[in-house]
Image (cartoon, grey):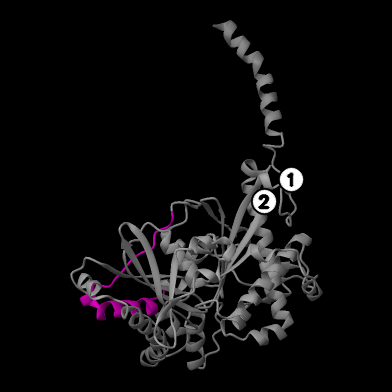
């Protein structure tokens, strides 16, 4: 026994030396990375050894969210080092220090916020002539790219450090369709510039001359999705996706995005059609601005903070109950009209069989509500009133579950409601191939033109 123990003890230094050598080898040693790196050190482009990594970027009016996909694994990027209230929600704001160096956390000199406001209000020409605001968008997204790549490379070095990474980017656009080529082209231009800036140096200086250089980023590596379609993909990839009629409601800070989705199950072949999509400026920031304007208040609300309770907001705006309710209802009537119109157009596609099955409860009819506004009573009450008015059709609320392939596991179902669009954006455009979007032509006939918006003929 003692001899065995002696031999074991004598072998221990050798064992630990071997372990040390193993951990210091290129396969296990943590890399020395620059903040602007897009590859592991020493890895060169190789088609045989390429790893596709897709960034789903939800550039929001108040918050930006990012989810990265490799194969069927999805990871939400944490921004906790910038100390936001929620680590997965980065305030859409750019900060400068005294040397004009750009940051994602608070600095003394200058802050750019409202980065997306011109885009939400369709003021594209105004934005193109406002070089400072346009630059703040590019530099903000460049920092997001740097943080996302660094986060991915550091956290996955043990698994992928010998692989050449091919980066792909999908970004959401506040549009019902992609017919607005001007806005789509603007987004593609912003992404290409931001990617180029993010690769040049670790510290990004707010220098508008950087925006004149065309970066080397292939057009096919950038995808532009309507945000409502990204939300639709999150629903399609969830475990609640089955035959039925769905009203999809995404309430962001800038816009309310609605879609009417019908899922068909024919001979075990599930497919779906989107009969109506609308995007309006009825989001939470617009709601707050409306109330402040109507009350003639000087309340300076920070859009990156939680929306206050309606009772607290009434007292802050110094309004009596009747006046506050009037102003609230005036704004919410806009959202209610959008929701009612969406339902009416979608409901027109019900077959007689569908209506009978709805009335007897054998066909699912529900609404799914996500986004920051899903936590605000006023928006929920509008959806609940629609549900009550359609009680004969058994319209009910359906919660969208957190996908099991989304990491980290600590993300709650409530948190995922804020990440649903980013999750949809992290999928490949080819995943939209089975989606049919109906558009009515001038004669009232349906036609489909959805797939071609995302996929070129060579990919069909």
Describe the element under mark 1 as helix, strand or loop. loop
Residue highlighted by disc 1: 43
| Viewer-nearest residue: 243 or 35 | 243
Q: Height in image: 49 above or below 299?
A: above
The image shows a total of numbered marks equal to: 2
* 10 Å crowding of disc 2: few (<14), some (14-19), many (20+): many
Left or right of residue 305: residue 192: right
Seen at 36% across and 92% down, the residue is: 322
Range drawn in magenta? 376-403
Residue 412 pos. (x, y %): 44, 57
Does the magenta-highlighted stretch encompass residue 104? no
Say the numbered circle drawn on residue 168. none
Quarter of the image containing the C terminus?
bottom right
Left or right of residue 416: residue 55: right
Q: Is residue 6 visible?
A: yes
| Viewer-nearest residue: 418 or 320 | 418
Q: Height in image: 211 above or below 405?
A: below
Quarter of the image containing the N terminus?
top right
Residue 291 pos. (x, y %): 47, 88
Residue highlighted by disc 2: 165
* 10 Å crowding of disc 1: few (<14), some (14-19), many (20+): few
Does the magenta-highlighted stretch encompass residue 379? yes
């Amino acid at each position: 026994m003692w001899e065995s123990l002696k031999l074991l003890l004598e072998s221990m230094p050798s064992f630990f030396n071997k372990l040390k050598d193993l951990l210091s080898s290129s396969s296990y040693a943590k890399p020395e990375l620059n903040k602007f790196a897009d590859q592991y050190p020493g890895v060169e482009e190789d088609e045989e050894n390429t790893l596709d990594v897709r960034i789903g970027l939800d550039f929001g009016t108040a918050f930006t969210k990012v989810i990265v996909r490799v194969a069927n694994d999805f990871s939400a990027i944490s921004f906790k080092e910038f100390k936001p209230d929620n680590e997965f929600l980065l305030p859409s704001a750019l900060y400068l220090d005294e040397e004009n160096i750009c940051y994602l956390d608070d600095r003394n000199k200058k802050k750019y916020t409202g980065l997306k406001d011109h885009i939400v209000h369709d003021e594209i020409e105004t934005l193109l002539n406002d070089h400072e605001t346009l630059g703040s968008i590019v530099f903000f997204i460049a920092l997001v790219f740097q943080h996302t790549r660094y986060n991915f490379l550091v956290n996955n070095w043990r698994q992928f450090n010998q692989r050449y990474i091919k980066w792909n980017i999908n970004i959401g656009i506040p549009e019902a369709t992609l017919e607005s080529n001007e806005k789509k082209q603007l987004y593609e231009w912003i992404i290409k510039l931001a990617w180029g800036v993010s690769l040049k140096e670790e510290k990004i200086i707010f220098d508008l001359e950087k925006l004149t250089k065309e970066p080397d980023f292939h057009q096919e590596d950038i995808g532009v999705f309507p945000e409502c379609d990204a939300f639709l993909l999150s629903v399609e990839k969830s475990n609640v996706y089955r035959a039925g009629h769905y009203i999809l409601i995404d309430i962001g800070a800038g816009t309310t995005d609605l879609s009417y989705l019908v899922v068909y199950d024919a001979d075990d072949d599930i497919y779906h059609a989107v009969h109506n999509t609308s995007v309006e400026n009825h989001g939470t920031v617009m709601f707050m601005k409306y109330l402040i304007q109507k009350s003639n208040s000087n309340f300076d609300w920070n859009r990156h903070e939680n929306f206050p309770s309606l009772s607290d907001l009434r007292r802050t705006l110094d309004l009596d109950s009747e006046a506050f309710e009037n102003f609230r209802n005036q704004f919410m009537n806009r959202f209610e009209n959008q929701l009612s119109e969406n339902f009416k157009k979608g409901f027109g596609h019900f077959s007689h069989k569908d209506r009978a099955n709805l009335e007897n409860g054998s066909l699912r009819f529900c609404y799914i509500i996500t986004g920051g506004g899903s936590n605000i009573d006023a928006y929920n009450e509008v959806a609940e009133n629609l549900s009550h008015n359609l009680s004969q059709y058994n319209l009910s609320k359906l919660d969208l579950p957190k996908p099991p392939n989304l990491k980290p596991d600590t993300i709650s179902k409530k948190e995922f409601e804020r990440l649903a669009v980013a999750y949809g954006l992290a999928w490949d455009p080819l995943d939209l191939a089975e989606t049919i979007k109906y558009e009515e032509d001038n004669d009232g006939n349906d036609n489909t033109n959805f797939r071609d918006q995302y996929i070129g003929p060579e990919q069909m």
